[in-house]
Image (cartoon, rainbow, N blue to C red):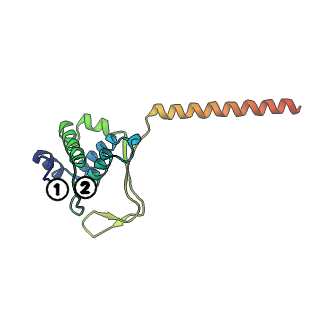
Amino acid sequence: MNTSFVDLTDASTINNATDLGRYQMAAYLVSQYNLPGGNNASNNGIQQAIWDMLDPKTFTAVYNTSTDNALEGAAQWYSATGGNGSTSRDSFLANYRIVSSTTMSSCASGTGLLCGGFQEQITVVPEPRHVAFMLMGLLLAGSMVFRKMQAARRSDA
């Protein structure tokens, strides 16, 4: 990872994080992504920071202020939430899942690394209220269809 722009404390936090810690910082960055903002410097910096954080040894990039801000923000969030197993970090991350391809296979024996398949994704798990709203909508739509079917049967009779 290029540390020429990121302060040394934040660079150390990122470089010394476990694999799980890097995924946790990437999930934090996903939460900072401004979807309606589309292709802008901040979103591009967040995306670049995620790539660098998850593949720090093989990916080289030209860093910019947006990428550095994202990397520093992730490192500071990680440090502020108290390390692995902290309650505040665990409650924040409870809404995220890592989705990996089932077709991935071992890259090299003894390394534990997996290769192949599609790119891993960090997804946000819908909150229970969103699921409840969806179910209410489906019930409403179903009741409307049911009423129309009943009305059609009555008019046929």
Q: Quadrant of residue 116?
A: bottom left
Label 2 and label 1: CA atoms lie apart by 9 Å
Q: Residue furthest right?
A: 157
Q: Residue furthest left?
A: 8
Identify the residue under disc 1: 2
Q: Quadrant of residue 83?
A: top left
Which element is circle 2 on?
helix
Q: What residue sits 28% from the left and 51% below the top?
A: 50
In the picture, which quadrant includes the N terminus?
bottom left
Determine whether label 2 and label 1 are within 8 Å by CB.
yes
Q: Quadrant of residue 82?
A: top left
The amino acid sitting under disc 2 is: Asp
The amino acid sitting under disc 1 is: Asn
Q: Is residue 36 above or below residue 101?
A: above
- Between residues 55 and 32, which one lies in front from this camera angle? 32
In the picture, which quadrant includes the C terminus?
top right
Query: Which numbered disc flags the more N-terminal residue, 2 or 1?
Result: 1
Left or right for 26, reference 136: left
